[in-house]
Image: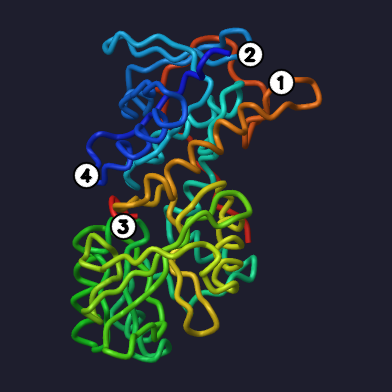
Amino acid sequence: MSRPVIALIADPTSPEGCREYLADAVELLTGTPPVRVDARHFAVGGAGRGERDGDRLRLQVPEEELDFTPDVVVLYEIPPHRRAALAGFQRLLDGHRAVSFHADPAAWRTATEKNLTVRRLARDGVAQMETVVLSGPSPEEAADAFERLGRDTWARPVVGTGGSDTFHVTTHAGLERAAAYYAAHGSDWLLSRDAGNVTADGGRHQFRVFVLGDRVVHAREHLQPSPDTPCNTCQGATPLHIAPGDLPPRLAELAIRATASVGLPFAGVDLAVENGGVVFEVNVHPAFVEGELELVAVPYIQAHLDAMAAPAPSGAPVPLGRGAAGTSGPVGFTQGLVDLPAPGGETGE
């Protein structure tokens, strides 16, 4: 049996390095490296093209001399601000016989834009801390939200990266600084009640849970010695690996529900055990840390291979998230962005 052709499409401008973990996982499992492609080629305005090749998808990037038909497309490590430009390519993936776990632009948007995440989790009854979405608020509107949330809050942008633009706000002066920061960056933002996720020694802690389908494949606890700093590893938090069976069951269930709520087949869910368990965010492309090649990257790639091999009643492979028939002719990605409907109801990810 021939080895599968796996395309690893990632953004090389990202400093996270997830693509290296995934490339190693592909080689470990298949004995051959993936075909690496710069994701920007398939964004709006990019030179990449896709065309139907029977019931398969043929990908071409002339300037890179790439012309191949993948069995699996791993679309990963796309910074939040670049994701919307790949919506057309995702729709193309969804209409062809190529396994890809990230072919739903609406799910990406729901998880990337945190105001939509808050709305979706609320709709589905997934526990989260009380949150107010602010868009160019007046000083009075921001102050009113701050008071209603108990004067112990966290401010974060609707679309952010790595926690460097997230602030622990406990005073009106701090609130004014946060509001000024977001106004200067033209960003809508969220103000959330503090979860009280403080350790006995005064630091912060939270959990990152990796969900694949309906199961937890790995988890870790993040310990942050500074109580006013986000619990991101890129902000100095120490990750402690946790086997899925050692994770509190209610956190596992909460992470699975949150992932399903936003519509992702794979995600990294940030949550706290305090307050009965609450979700902070659902990450589309969670970053990997040392030790997670075997713990996360390998199971993730293996799931693609399993989906490729699973027979449908017709005998055709069943890619996760497969949609209707795609475009019959060659398709480039120079068209304008399509405005996705709002759902009803971090480098550093």
Expressed as whole percent of the image width and height from the top left, the position of residue 42 reads: 38, 25
Expressed as whole percent of the image width and height from the top left, the position of residue 11 reads: 30, 35
Element assignment for label 2: loop
Residue 15: give its label: 4
Per the image, the residue denoted by label 1 is 316
Q: Nearer the N terminus, badge 2 or badge 4?
A: 4
Taking 86 as reference, is 295 above or below it? below
- The answer to whether the residues at label 1 and label 2 have Cβ atoms under 8 Å apart is yes
Per the image, the residue denoted by label 2 is 55
Separation of marks 1 and 2 at Cα, in angstroms: 10 Å
Element assignment for label 3: loop
Q: Nearer the viewer, residue 124 or 65?
A: 65
Separation of marks 2 and 4 at Cα, in angstroms: 36 Å
Per the image, the residue denoted by label 3 is 160
Separation of marks 3 and 1 at Cα, in angstroms: 40 Å
Q: Nearer the N terminus, badge 4 or badge 1?
A: 4
Answer few, some or many: residues within 10 Å of disc 3's Cα (few below 14, many 20 plus, some between 14 and 19).
many
Expressed as whole percent of the image width and height from the top left, the position of residue 177 reads: 18, 76
Q: Nearer the viewer, mark 1 or mark 2?
A: 1
Taking 326 as reference, is 170 above or below it? below
Expressed as whole percent of the image width and height from the top left, the position of residue 168 reads: 27, 79
Q: Nearer the viewer, mark 3 or mark 1?
A: 1
- The answer to whether the residues at label 3 and label 1 have Cβ atoms under 8 Å apart is no
Q: Nearer the viewer, residue 341 or 200?
A: 200
Separation of marks 2 and 3 at Cα, in angstroms: 38 Å
Q: Nearer the N terminus, badge 2 or badge 3?
A: 2
Q: Nearer the viewer, mark 4 or mark 3?
A: 4
